[in-house]
């Protein structure tokens, strides 16, 4: 191949690159759906706030959950993890919020939380507001 009158060797790449090497093709995440890891569960942890502590008095608990989780998956995971009966689940998607520190503008990450209502007489032992 000639480039501006100079001869230059052509490079033939016969071997595929390993994942993470320079020149490796990136896999598109849009082509494959996001699958939650089953060994980690769906719950990220308890969500602690003033409203969450007042809800715990009325037998409702607030959890942070993965974005791809739905009500049925959350219900099954809470019942399995804490051995309780669930009355209902409400899911809230909190959007990202803009934050400015000095002259640097950015965003605070949004997340998904679930409010889980337990049957009468049930409680989660590990939670203390």
Image (tube, helix red, strand yellow):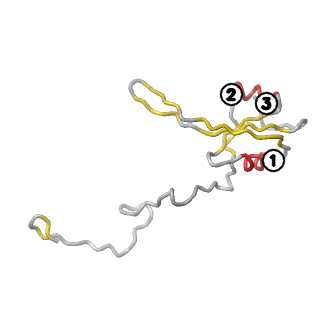
Residue at the left extreme, as displayed: 5
Q: Nearer the viewer, residue 68 or 103?
A: 68
| Quadrant in the picture for the C terminus | top right
**127 relative position to 104: left or right:** right
Q: How many marks?
A: 3
Expressed as whole percent of the image width and height from the top left, the position of residue 33 reads: 57, 57
Expressed as whole percent of the image width and height from the top left, the position of residue 125 reads: 82, 37
Check disc 1 and report its element: helix, strand or loop: helix
The circle on residue 79 is 1
Check disc 3 and report its element: helix, strand or loop: helix
Residue at the bottom extreme, as displayed: 14
**17 relative position to 128: left or right:** left
Expressed as whole percent of the image width and height from the top left, the position of residue 14 reads: 35, 76
Alpha carbon separation for disc pair 3 and 1: 17 Å
Alpha carbon separation for disc pair 3 and 2: 11 Å
Q: Who's the residue at 39% across and 62% down the image? A: 21
Residue 91 lies, with reference to residue 51, above or below; the image says below
**61 relative position to 32: left or right:** right
Q: Who's the residue at 26% across and 72% down the image? A: 11
| Quadrant in the picture for the N terminus | bottom left
Label 3–label 1 contact, CB within 8 A: no
Expressed as whole percent of the image width and height from the top left, the position of residue 81 reads: 78, 48
In the rendered structure, which disc, 3 or 1, sits on the residue that comes first in sequence? 3
**5 relative position to 94: left or right:** left
The circle on residue 56 is 3
Residue on which disc 2 sits: 49
């Amino acid at each position: 191949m000639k480039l501006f009158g100079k001869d230059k060797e052509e490079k033939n790449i016969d071997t595929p690159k390993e994942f993470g090497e320079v020149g490796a093709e990136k896999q598109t995440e849009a082509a494959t759906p996001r699958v939650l890891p089953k060994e980690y569960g769906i719950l990220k942890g308890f969500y602690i706030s003033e409203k969450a502590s007042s809800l715990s008095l009325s037998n409702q608990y607030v959890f942070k959950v993965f974005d791809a989780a739905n009500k049925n998956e959350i219900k099954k995971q809470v019942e399995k993890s804490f051995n309780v009966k669930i009355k209902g689940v409400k899911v809230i998607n909190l959007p990202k919020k803009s934050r400015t520190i000095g002259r640097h503008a950015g965003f605070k990450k949004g997340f998904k939380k679930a409010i889980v209502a337990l049957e009468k007489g049930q409680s989660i032992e590990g939670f203390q507001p």
